[in-house]
Image (spheres, coloured by chain):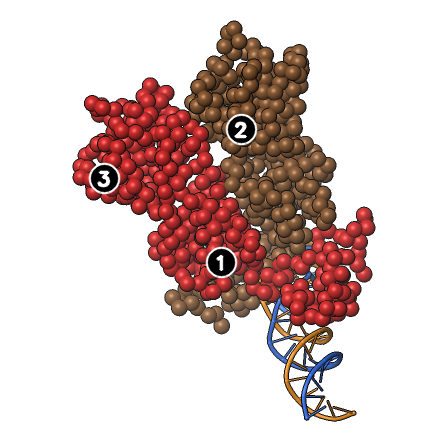
Chain colours: A red, B brown, C blue, D orange
Amino acid sequence: MNKAAPNGRPRARSSVTIQHIAARAGVSTATVSRTLANPDVVTAKTRERVLRAVAETGYTPNVAARNLRARRSMMILVVLPNVANPFFAQVLRGVDDELVTAGYDMIIGNLDNLVAREARYVRLAQAGQVDGVLLMTGRIPKGDTRNMDDLGLPMAAVCAAVPGLAAPQIVADDRGASIAVAKHFIGLGHQRFGYVSGLQGNVNDVQRYAGFLEGLDAAGVPREAVTYWPGDFNLRAGVEAARAFLTLAERPTAVYAACDEIAIAFIKTVSDAGLEVPKDVSIIGFDGIEFAEFISPTLTTMRQPRYELGRASARALLEEIQDGGTGERLIELPAPMVVGDSTAPPRPGR
Amino acid sequence: MNKAAPNGRPRARSSVTIQHIAARAGVSTATVSRTLANPDVVTAKTRERVLRAVAETGYTPNVAARNLRARRSMMILVVLPNVANPFFAQVLRGVDDELVTAGYDMIIGNLDNLVAREARYVRLAQAGQVDGVLLMTGRIPKGDTRNMDDLGLPMAAVCAAVPGLAAPQIVADDRGASIAVAKHFIGLGHQRFGYVSGLQGNVNDVQRYAGFLEGLDAAGVPREAVTYWPGDFNLRAGVEAARAFLTLAERPTAVYAACDEIAIAFIKTVSDAGLEVPKDVSIIGFDGIEFAEFISPTLTTMRQPRYELGRASARALLEEIQDGGTGERLIELPAPMVVGDSTAPPRPGR
DNA sequence: ATACACAATGTAAACGATTACATTATGGTC
DNA sequence: GACCATAATGTAATCGTTTACATTGTGTAT
């Protein structure tokens, strides 16, 4: 008997099962299943009867049952350091776009910058809840328990390379872009430089600083001409670095910030202190967030192809799942410079 | 037989089942299940044996099987218009924090601003894949197919009220805040006003405009003194509104923007055109995004308690799931004004 | 010692799909 | 019309838990 809801419509929460459809259409459950999974394998007449029954009852296959039997979940776990970070939000959109077209959905594993939270998602993945894992974090510490790497699940890393991970890694060319930053500053005639770090030890930050130094080295800039400020990937870090900058007797005239938030806060802070950007100090950021062109002066920045990073990584992960995976490889997308008004030659005579 | 991985560690992808644990611990599967679900119901000795077996094998219960039998998934579907929008990202963090402590995880239903995408998530919810739905969108159109509202699933709405939805709705006090905006402008002595709309017909936008007008009405401002620009909740809309503003012979001296992005782009555009903010025009935004205090001039804005909106809505949803729900009710959180440098009295003699 | 309440465990039936294998229907060829 | 290949469908096992119900064990009151 097909129980109807009070309003006469089919009952919600899918109390209607494949048995009901089979009975209603006068076929076996196997035929119903086949009709839905592979319509061409059944007779047109059968197909029509089954589909009508489905439509009339509003039947939707129970996912748990399907997952259990078929041993897949059509779910991808996306692990990221912090959902609140707009940078990842844009990457997520790329991931989602790609996953959706392949019929997958995503579970968000938000670490909230706490390494301890990772265990939860390792467990979730272990439980067969997901068909693959996308790591949006460069920091997968080898804990006391088994970690993601050992799960034997298809994986991919995006945004930040995970050293030693045997999986596709999709990242922006941090090093190359940072060399370009150095070259740009040099080309403008700068001689004293500063670097505001993102998170200490973060793989992106390391690459950016290394690339920056490499570019400066190539131009013969002595290491003493480069000031380094530790920081974090947020606005506050920009304020603090700017304060440190302001106390210097001989200030750098060109500052490279590990991300746009830092750069924007840096500009705001030094401007409030009476300096002019770019006349007194030139600044280049990283990421190419939208706000970069809506501040004054507009920010020169290295644009990460965030959406594309998301798409490419999801695509790579899907390949891992389907083809068994081509496995370990590094895909570097270029991060081109977007020239704004925050860079100029240094004030003459300085 | 317990198959070990090549490295001698327990095999990944949880090929070890509850049967293995039962055998290893010399108990029945029922006892294993009980030990894990409700440890105090078994003998200390039994508990110890079971837990040891679990630890030695690295057993994790298969979630699909559990979901199937227990008829719950410990998953919440979060439907939002656009993952790439930083505003929602912060709300998501609040949601996640609350859900995690209750043992739930979240599936992201990203509509990408396309109404058509909703069907996918209705289906997902129908399939018993989630225990509840959190709607972060004010636009749930009654489609030709059954929509979320009819699912019979625990639900809650956040950020934007869904008219007619019989569920808890957690929103900021758009109207009250907008009245405060009007009062603030009036208090400064302004007489000509502008409003830059968010998405046309969006429930938040409607409330904000209504509240703004209400506040102006209360001060006896004639309707002709208010210019309305249609827009969208993004930077581009601010640019366009500003361009329209600039063409006016008699410009408003006080502009209220439906969100901070609009306000920021508006400021940038009129500044580039040679006007001074706030001397020539005062601007107030909405949301209180972080960047608001890092532009020049810093933005006066109505701060939405985004994290708290997320938390409160998740809490309400969990109550719906657990207690059967107290159901329909409106929770309005205040959106206090954060006064920046973008507001001042109008230039004298204007 | 016996009976009895109650705690601890075991047995086996769900949960709702997919799918290997068995069976029946269909159509083409001689 | 008989035969056979092949297409279409049916039967029933299976995925790995949870849990209702049955059974056994333990301690206490009589």
Q: Mark 3 or mark 1, which is nearer to you?
A: 3
Residue B77 visible in this rendered orientation of the protein: yes
* Residue type marked 2: Glu
Q: Are marks 3 and 1 on the same chain?
A: yes
The correct choice, above or below, for B288 with respect to B250 in the image is below
Between B272 and B6, the residue placed more toward the observer is B272
Residue A340 is situated, as x and y percent measured from the top left of the image, at 37, 32
* Residue type marked 3: Leu
Q: Residue, x 31% and y 45% (percent of image)?
A: A175
D25 sits left or right of A160 in the view: right
Residue A319 is situated, as x and y percent measured from the top left of the image, at 47, 60
Q: Cα distance, mark 1 to mark 2?
A: 40 Å
Q: Mark 3 or mark 2, which is nearer to you?
A: 2
Q: Residue, x 54% and y 44% (percent of image)?
A: B100
Provide the residue designation for mark 3.
A216
Q: Earlier in the sequence, mark 3 or mark 1?
A: 3
Mark 1, Cα crowd under 10 Å, few <14 / some 14-19 / many 20+, is: many
Q: Secondary structure at mark 2?
A: helix
Pointer 2 indicates a residue of which chain? B
Q: Cα distance, mark 3 to mark 2?
A: 41 Å
* Residue type marked 1: Leu
